[in-house]
């Protein structure tokens, strides 16, 4: 463990990565356009978006695995456009298992050091320390096929970190793993990243993952960044309807904006953006901003009547779909101890949290 | 679960044994007949080993010297053909796989094509080409390696491709590059070790095909092992058959070696990662 500590101390921390107006085209398809993003030293930024939104392209352009057609990428102020991948000094963990099958875990970790002509003794020491960092020091001699998926990705992480790269790139490293391992490794990545203070770009399509580990999240759509912000900002103050819909679980309800308030079936809700123009809109209401009450309870102006369609037990919470009397359905997330039965008449109460809206097309 | 399903669909032991037996007979009968032929004592009747002992006591000198020279030619051609596979086919396949995946079908068709063209037809096309080759590089036997490089393409391609399909070459090479490896290191330290079986299998099949090749060499008036055996057989059919048997033995040895290489070495899970190098088509050398 003492080795681990020494090497941690040696690690260069915090390169500043700056994308300025980066664009990438595949034929006529614009995979990335006007992409501007700055990663501060030691920061973990998650690129979140649906598939095809350009998040992996952005990461691959930074790694040099794809060329960029326009714009500039600078690391600590140096333009890296002319540098081939092998000289960009980055560590990368891939979505698919990428350990070299003909080498043991230790030899895999040593690979980057071998490329840098580090003497054998030091190489072995540093590889062992890196494996200890991910908790796999006992697996030095194992081959990829002798490791579980989670262990393989941890070795890949050690391999990416052992050269003390300027930037760590994580391309959906958890998506091939099962749910439990995914959460464990996610937390481990975050812990190691914080300890080392290494600037990290984390690509994922899983919003839970992005919100849980990132200092800031950049939500992407059609090759552009829609919004960059802390997880809390994105969740509570989505800049666009796309983000309101994509981050978190929201109900989409038809409504009308009048004088800075949204009205849904007679329920008046404050707007996130009070300056929104009047007119017909779609209103996004988070599942957790709704509560259920038995029918006949004190009906205020903030509730709608409905009938339970289905109620699913999800372990720590319960999700219930309600058919509204006015038409349409809403999903309510609530305590597991409330057990509405199918067909029950209920009231859906709105918490009154400010809502984002999108002009109805 | 999956094991049960597989057993249910697999042919029974008896059926498998029967199929194997019939196929084995098809191969064994001509070979046994050849062995029987070499053991005959001519008009006297009965069997002995005198033709074998005479041949080996003579040390393959004198009248059989040309066979040795021809064997040397064939071995040289085999080496040349393998060099073409290693230096041309393997890098091309890797380049197409990693950088130009859209060309994969085209490459496959080009590589498989020679198997559908009879050697005799190939020679008709090659004859004028070789007259140019002869003018530029002389008419040495080694120039045949160019033609053999084409005839072994389907076998070598299939062997290497089977291995290539089982290895995530793209991700491995990208991982190596992000770790600081240049293209040379990627090729030699990452790709070749993981494609070792496919490449070796392709090379051995190429050797087996070249050692058994007759038509092209004969029609282009070059001397290789098979054409020399035909010449010998004109004078002494017994010796020709003995030499053919030895050549067959060498080819079998090579194919067995390929089988070994294709078998998983460590645990069954390794197969999923590094893929067996077979199935490759068995070469059908056109022996006389």
Image (cartoon, coloured by chain):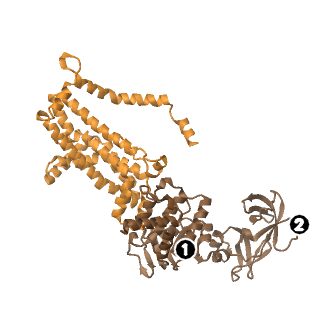
| Residue B209: quadrant of the picture | top left
Residue at coordinates 25% horizontally, 34% vertically from top-left?
Answer: B246
Please give the chain letter of the residue carrying mark 2. A
| Residue underneath mark 2 | A296
Give the residue at x 43% y 49%: B275
Return the chain for callout 1.
A
- Distance CA(mark 2)–CA(mark 1): 55 Å
Foreground pick, A284 / A121 = A121
The image shows residue B100, relative to residue A222, as above or below, that is: above
Location of residue B208 (image quadrant): top left
According to the colouring, which chain is orange?
Answer: B
The spot of residue A214 in percent (x, y) is 58, 73
Extreme top residue here? B44
Q: Nearer the viewer, residue A72 or B254?
A: B254
Residue A299 as seen in the image, left or right of residue A274: right
* SS category of the residue bearing label 2: loop
* Residue A195, numbered label: 1
Chain A rendered in what hue?
Answer: brown
Query: Label 2: few (<14), some or many (≥20) within 10 Å?
Result: few
> Whole-percent x and y of residue A88?
41, 73
Query: Viewed as shown, does residue A356 lie left or right of B115?
Result: right
Q: Secondary structure at mark 1?
A: helix
């Amino acid at each position: 463990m003492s080795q681990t500590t020494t090497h941690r101390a040696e690690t260069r921390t915090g390169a500043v990565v700056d994308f300025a107006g980066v664009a990438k085209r595949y034929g006529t398809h614009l995979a990335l356009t006007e992409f501007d993003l700055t990663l501060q030293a030691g920061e973990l930024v998650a690129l979140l978006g649906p598939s095809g939104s350009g998040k992996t392209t952005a990461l691959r352009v930074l790694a040099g695995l794809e060329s960029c057609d326009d714009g500039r990428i600078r690391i600590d102020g140096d333009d890296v456009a002319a540098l081939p991948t092998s000289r960009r000094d980055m560590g990368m963990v891939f979505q698919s298992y990428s350990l070299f099958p003909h080498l043991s875990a230790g030899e895999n970790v040593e690979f980057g050091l071998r490329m840098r002509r580090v003497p054998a003794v030091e190489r072995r020491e540093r590889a062992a320390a890196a494996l200890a960092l991910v908790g796999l020091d006992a697996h030095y001699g194992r081959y990829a096929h002798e490791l579980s998926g989670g262990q393989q990705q941890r070795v890949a992480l050690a391999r990416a970190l052992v050269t003390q790269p300027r930037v760590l790139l994580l391309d959906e490293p958890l998506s091939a793993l099962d749910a439990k391992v995914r959460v464990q490794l996610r937390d481990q990545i975050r812990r190691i990243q914080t300890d080392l203070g290494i600037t990290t770009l984390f690509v994922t399509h899983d919003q839970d993952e992005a919100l849980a580990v990132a200092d800031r999240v950049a939500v992407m759509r059609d090759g552009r960044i829609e919004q960059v912000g802390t997880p809390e900002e994105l969740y509570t103050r989505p800049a666009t309807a796309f983000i309101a819909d994509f981050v978190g679980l929201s109900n989409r309800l038809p409504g009308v904006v009048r004088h800075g308030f949204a009205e849904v079936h007679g329920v008046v809700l404050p707007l996130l953006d009070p300056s929104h123009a009047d007119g017909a809109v779609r209103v996004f209401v988070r599942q957790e901003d709704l509560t259920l009450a038995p029918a006949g309870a004190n009906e205020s102006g903030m509730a709608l009547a409905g009938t339970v369609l289905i109620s699913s037990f999800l372990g720590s919470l319960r999700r219930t779909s309600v058919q509204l009397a006015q038409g349409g359905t809403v999903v309510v997330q609530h305590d597991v101890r409330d057990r509405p039965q199918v067909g029950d008449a209920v009231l859906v109460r709105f918490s009154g949290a400010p809502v984002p809206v999108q002009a109805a097309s | 679960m999956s094991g049960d399903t597989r057993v249910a669909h697999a042919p029974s032991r008896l059926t498998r044994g029967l199929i194997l037996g019939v196929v084995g007979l098809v191969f064994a009968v001509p070979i046994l007949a050849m062995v029987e032929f070499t053991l005959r004592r001519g008009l006297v009747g009965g069997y002995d080993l005198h033709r074998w002992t005479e041949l080996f006591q003579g040390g393959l000198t004198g009248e059989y010297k040309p066979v040795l020279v021809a064997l040397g030619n064939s071995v040289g051609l085999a080496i040349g053909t393998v060099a073409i596979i290693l230096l041309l086919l393997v890098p091309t396949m890797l380049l197409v796989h990693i950088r130009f995946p859209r060309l994969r079908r085209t490459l496959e068709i080009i590589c498989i094509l020679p198997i559908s063209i009879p050697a005799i037809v190939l020679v008709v096309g090659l004859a004028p080409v070789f007259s140019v080759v002869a003018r530029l590089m002389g008419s040495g036997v080694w120039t045949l390696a160019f033609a053999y490089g084409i005839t072994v393409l389907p076998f070598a391609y299939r062997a290497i491709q089977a291995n290539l399909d089982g290895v995530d070459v793209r991700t491995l090479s990208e991982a190596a590059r992000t770790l600081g490896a240049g293209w040379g290191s990627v090729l030699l330290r990452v790709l070749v070790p993981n494609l070792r079986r496919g490449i070796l299998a392709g090379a051995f099949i190429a050797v087996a095909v070249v050692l058994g090749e007759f038509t092209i060499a004969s029609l282009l008036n070059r001397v290789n092992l098979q054409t020399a055996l035909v010449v010998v057989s004109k004078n002494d059919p017994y010796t020709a058959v003995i030499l053919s048997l030895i050549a067959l033995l060498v080819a079998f040895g090579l194919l067995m070696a390929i089988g070994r290489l294709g078998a998983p070495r460590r645990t069954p899970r390794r197969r999923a990662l590094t893929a067996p190098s077979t199935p490759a088509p068995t070469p059908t050398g056109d022996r006389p």
